[in-house]
Image (cartoon, helix red, strand yellow):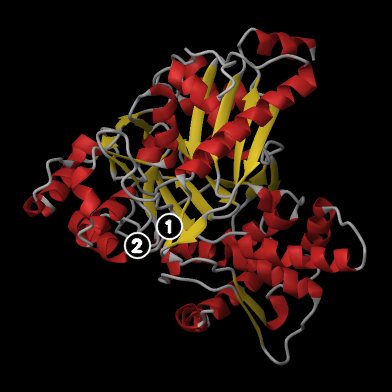
Amino acid sequence: MGNTKELIESGRAVMGLEFGSTRIKAVLIDEDHIPVAGGDHEWENRFENGVWTYSLDDIHEGLQDCFRKLKEDVKDRYGVKLNKLAAIGISGMMHGYLPFDKDGKLLAPFRTWRNTITGEAASALTKEFDFNVPQRWSISHLYQAILNKEDHVKDIAFLTTLAGYIHWMLTGEKVMGVGEASGMFPINDKTRDYDSAMMDKFDALIADRGFAWKLADILPKVLNAGENAGVLTEEGAKFLDPTGELEAGTPLCPPEGDAGTGMAATNSIAVRTGNVSAGTSFFAMVVLEKSMSKVHEEIDMVTTPDGAPVAMVHCNNGTTDLNGWVNLFKEYEEAKGNKPDMGELYGLLYNKALEGDKNCGGLLAYNYNAGEAVTGLNAGRPLFVRTPDARFTLANFMRSHLYASLATLKIGCDILFKEENVKVDKLFGHGGFFKTKGVGQSMLAAAMNAPVAVMKTAGEGGPWGMALLAAYMLNGKGTTLPVYLSDKVFGGDSGDVMEPDQADVKGFDEYVEAYKKTLPAEAAAAENFTI
């Protein structure tokens, strides 16, 4: 306690802060990379005028409230004020569209990763580049706005993501970590910068539009892990901490996306490692030994925070629908006059799923609150269906919804592992899906038919991973990021590993075959069911 108090007072603690889909979270770590304090702010996206978005007020208030709660936690734990930091790292949900004019005015509402409104643009760019460009990428949003003839496009001076925006507000620097940048525009594996040939193709594609800018003019500068990305300005310090107590001058590392922080938090930066982030969205990241044989629209090519190529299967929909069902059971308990502990309730229901039939006994669920590019749907409706003779038990019900959270991910990863024969030695799981010991882990091992490891730090998630990247900038000179993480942070810890149970693998395969055959029902629900 005394050492930590002195560490904080002397400004040697490092902060990582991440904007997740439902929570903004800050983590403070010590010189051994151990979390010593935290703060968070819950928020939710809005669906306005056909767009999933957060307002700038939401962003600013959430940032400041999260940092305020971090300060309160420091005060409560150690009796000192948080006035100075050794380093800061900012992360956010990847992709999306935040266009600004030369005066720093936002030109269109923030379009998040969750939107599936850029199908025409994404398809055209994929064909033009011979490279998969997903709908949620920033360049897809930009090109779709051009195709839609949106008036604001001509005035764009800077295009960024949520992490890049916050970093800009804190430092004045228009930069981006390479992992986050790889979700804006394709990255060249050799240069670890935007692919210049593809940039030229894009500029040629829009040459007849008469814009005063070229793509290179409006995208953030790409930086790699370990580089200094600016310092906290006086204005930035007041933006983060309106009380004025936080000192300026703290160095910041390159801002990253939640995919990159997940890789750092699970020590899956090296070749043949991978991780699955499981929360509001699900995505798998596998660091490749070699390029894939062809373009797959279900698989994105992004990078690690130090620029190595990564195959990414991204699913817009994660545990939102599953959480909704758990909350229904919570309401039932409250109707009986009970006050359920949510941790216990999740544990009870998740463990109950382990008693279910391996193929869920004739029950099927779709967790689609939004569209899903992997399965070709531009909109979604959560859907539960069963056969008349199904084994309709609580165990099968919960198992079907846990499977549903992973089904789309499995469809995409089957391409990676079965068609492309990509090798992975181990997958690391992190996120709320894995909090109940052994449940989500066993389900993922069955879905991927691969060993799955969960570390003790799995619950720390992206903010901790971002803090590790900030610490690497401070202390990692002369060593690579994979070596720094393995030697300085994880110390050989490989986590608790669970091998796939082949009966579970067979059951999940049967479930997914039914899932794929019934997708037209989900598509019909999305198209026709409105209120």
Residue at 40 percent of width and 35 percent of height? 164
Q: In the rendered image, which quarter is residue 75 located in?
A: top right
Callout 2: SS: loop
- Disc assigned to residue 350: none
Q: Is residue 472 left or right of residue 122?
A: right
Can see residue 30?
A: yes
- Label 2: few (<14), some (14–19) or many (≥20) C-alpha neighbours in 10 Å: some
Residue at 49 percent of width and 42 percent of height? 57
Please identify the quadrant where the C terminus is shown: bottom right
Query: Decide: marks 1, 2 in contact (CB < 8 A)?
Result: no
Q: Nearer the viewer, residue 433 or 525?
A: 525
Q: Position of residue 404 (x, y in %)?
A: 61, 68
Q: Amino acid at mark 2?
A: Glu
Q: Is residue 96 left or right of residue 149?
A: right
Residue at 67 percent of width and 13 percent of height? 8
Q: Position of residue 345 (x, y in %)?
A: 82, 58
Please name the residue that numbered disc 2 is placed on: 297
Q: Position of residue 222 (x, y in %)?
A: 31, 31
Residue 172 drawn above or below residue 507: above
Please identify the quadrant where the N terminus is shown: top right
Q: How many marks?
A: 2
Q: Is residue 185 left or right of residue 279?
A: left
Q: Which is more N-terminal, label 2 or label 1?
A: 2
**Residue extending furthest bottom?**
388
Q: Nearer the viewer, residue 365 or 415?
A: 365
Q: CA distance from mark 1 to mark 2?
A: 17 Å
Residue 33 drawn above or below residue 327: above
Callout 1: SS: loop
Q: Amino acid at mark 1?
A: Asn
Please name the residue that numbered disc 1 is placed on: 421
Q: Nearer the viewer, mark 1 or mark 2?
A: 2
Q: In the rendered image, which quarter is residue 98 located in?
A: top left
